[in-house]
């Protein structure tokens, strides 16, 4: 029976192992994970009636791969939806929390009146944003920075005050170097098709409304809404994947080397042990996989090394409701870099999701770090917490000490897609395709979130199973 070794037990590696057993049940699958737990960046904790996501907290349903996996695992009953009575977010503007204008869609408005009546932008900023309605299409280019695109269409103030903080939390990258094509190509498509991005969005909204009136369940995720999680946090997914694997799963087992042996491989573990494999899937960060593939293909290692990774910190804090002098009528707030604060964003978790905090309590999750502020992940817990509490006091008026705190550092786990990223992704894919029985998976080529990590893991499994079949 051919043996496949999957290196890395994050969601990409787990999805790869699970898919291998779905498409080729006769394979022997061994999963090797460096840490003493599975899930990688995904981690949820249940404590004192709280459900705390200590990494990701949401799965987008627009990209179907994760949702399809959730359904195959039979987790539908455990899905929770966002509590949409309080949908919406605040943004910090000149030191105060101001509602993000209704209909603002990450980079551009899909409705003008809420933007015009908001105090987030100055009048000159609003007039410049309206320039999008009359400006001609930009020059054709293979890629451009997301920041350059927003500034070109809607002006620098729109970029600084709204687009940057909205995307900063997702990609942890400065918009001036973030690839538009690799992250939000639909905005470029809107410009190509409609010339004005805002007009394109408005027409899209009108079409969606019509579609919803027609057939509610046409789109994959329509039943659940745009984002889902689970009653026990996102880790429900990785726990279910782990439980589905009948094969060998070895924790605290970092792989240090990979050598070609005949048609297969010899994996070298940190303790000196060696494992033979007929096929290998590397589901580790690009810079980790680079070290492992280097002896086989130095050029591939160079491409992988050229993808920078960022760090961030999440801090979960619990309070009694009466200790927070804010109506908590949204999912949280984002902070533009131009405000010069250490906080990047704060999610009001127990408002956003049901069942995250016991009655009368509130769970908040703060995000620090991001491009230019990666050093946050190196600060000690006391400093991070003091920083976070100072910001919560200034912005939300919270004076009380939290009754529960969880600080998590996410060091070099988030790939940053620079302008031109897709060219690099293609080069990586072409080189991997030329290496028999070796596949790579993870969010470093075609999408940084959970759905794309699942998709890459499953694609790696299918390709390897076909080669071994
Ligand atoms: C703070 C934060 C919030 C996020 N929020 C969201 C969100 O809300 N929604 C969303 O879709 N995405 C979110 N993401 C992104 C999401 O977490 C990732 O896309 C996804 O978890 C990546 O999974 P992965 O398996 O590719 O990598 P990882 O989770 O990093 O897993 C890689 C695994 O490989 C292991 N490993 C490393 N080296 C070795 C070795 N030598 N040998 C063996 N094992 C090794 C690691 O220990 C790790 O377990 C967030 C990310 C962060 C950091």
Image (spheres, rainbow, N blue to C red):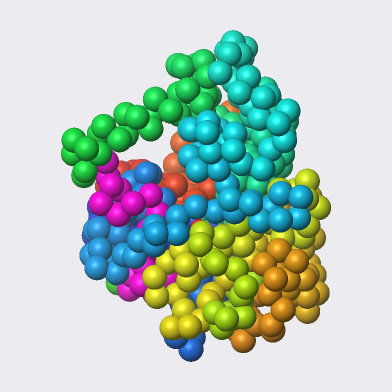
The image quadrant that residue 128 belongs to is: top right
Q: Is residue 236 left or right of residue 336?
A: left
Pinpoint residue 6: horizontal percent, then vertical percent. Answer: 45, 60
| Towards the viewer: 389 or 263 | 389
Residue situated furthest front in the rendering? 117
Tell me if I can see residue 204 in this picture: yes
- Describe residue 386's horizontal placement relative to residue 110 as left or right: right
Q: Position of residue 196 (x, y in %)?
A: 53, 19
Residue shown at 43% from the left, 28% from the top: 202
Q: Is residue 258 above or below residue 407?
A: above
Q: Is residue 356 magenta?
A: no
At which x and y percent is residue 345? Answer: 64, 58
Total numbered badges shown on the rendered structure: 0
Q: If the picture is divided into quarters, which one holds ligand 1? A: bottom right
Is residue 278 visible in this depiction of the protein?
no
Q: Is residue 225 magenta?
A: yes
Q: Quadrant of the N terminus?
A: bottom left
The vertical placement of 108 against 64, above or below, is above
Q: Compared with residue 69, is residue 298 higher up or lower down, i.e. above or below?
A: above
Q: Nearer the viewer, residue 193 or 199?
A: 199
Camera-side residue: 43 or 437? 43
- For image coordinates 48% across by 39% down, the residue present is 103
Q: Residue 143 appears at what percent x and percent y?
A: 61, 24
280 up-or-down from 118: above or below: below
The boundaries of the magenta stretch are 219-243
Q: As drawn, which residue projects farthest toward the bottom?
A: 48
Q: Residue at x 49, y 33 (%)?
A: 111
Quadrant hosting residue 288: bottom right
The residue at 62%/80% (across/down) is 323
């Amino acid at each position: 029976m051919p043996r496949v070794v999957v290196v890395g037990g994050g969601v990409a590696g787990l999805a790869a192992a699970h898919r291998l057993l779905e498409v080729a049940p006769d394979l022997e699958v061994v999963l090797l994970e460096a840490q003493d737990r599975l899930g990688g960046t995904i981690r949820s904790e249940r404590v004192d009636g709280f459900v705390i996501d200590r990494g990701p907290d949401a799965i987008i349903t627009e990209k179907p791969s994760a949702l399809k996996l959730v359904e195959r695992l039979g987790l539908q009953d455990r899905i929770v939806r966002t509590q949409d009575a309080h949908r919406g977010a605040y943004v910090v503007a000149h030191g105060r929390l101001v509602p993000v204008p209704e209909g603002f869609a990450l980079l551009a408005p899909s409705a003008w009146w809420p933007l015009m009546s908001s105090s987030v932008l100055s009048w000159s900023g609003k007039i410049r944003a309206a320039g999008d309605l009359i400006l001609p299409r930009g020059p054709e280019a293979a890629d451009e920075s997301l920041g350059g695109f927003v500034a070109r269409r809607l002006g620098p103030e729109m970029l600084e005050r709204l687009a940057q903080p909205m995307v900063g939390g997702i990609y942890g990258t400065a918009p001036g170097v973030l690839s538009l094509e690799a992250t939000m190509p639909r905005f470029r498509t809107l410009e190509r098709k409609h010339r004005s991005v805002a007009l394109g969005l408005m027409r899209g909204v009108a079409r969606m409304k019509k579609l919803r009136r027609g057939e509610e369940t046409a789109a994959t995720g329509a039943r659940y809404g745009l984002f889902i999680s689970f009653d026990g946090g996102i880790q429900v997914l990785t726990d279910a994947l782990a439980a589905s694997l009948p094969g060998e799963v070895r924790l605290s087992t970092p792989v240090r080397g990979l050598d070609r042996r005949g048609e297969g491989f010899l994996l070298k573990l940190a303790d000196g042990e060696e494992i033979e494999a007929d096929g290998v899937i590397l589901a580790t960060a690009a810079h980790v996989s680079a070290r492992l593939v280097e002896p086989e293909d130095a050029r591939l290692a160079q491409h992988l090394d050229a993808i920078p990774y960022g760090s961030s910190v999440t801090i979960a804090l619990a309070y009694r409701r009466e200790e927070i002098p804010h109506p908590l009528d949204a999912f949280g707030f984002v902070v533009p870099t131009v405000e010069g604060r250490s906080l990047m964003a704060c999610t009001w978790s127990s408002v956003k999701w049901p069942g995250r905090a016991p009655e009368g309590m509130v769970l908040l999750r703060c995000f620090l770090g991001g491009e230019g502020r990666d050093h946050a992940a190196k600060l000690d817990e006391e400093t991070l917490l003091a920083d976070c509490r100072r910001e919560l006091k200034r912005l939300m008026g919270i004076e009380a000490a939290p009754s529960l705190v969880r600080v998590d550092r996410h060091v070099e786990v988030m790939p940053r897609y620079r302008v031109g990223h897709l060219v690099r992704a293609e080069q990586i894919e072409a080189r991997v395709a030329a290496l028999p029985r070796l596949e790579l998976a993870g969010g470093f080529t075609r999408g940084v979130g959970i759905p794309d990590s699942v998709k890459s893991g499953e694609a790696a499994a299918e390709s390897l199973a076909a080669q071994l079949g």
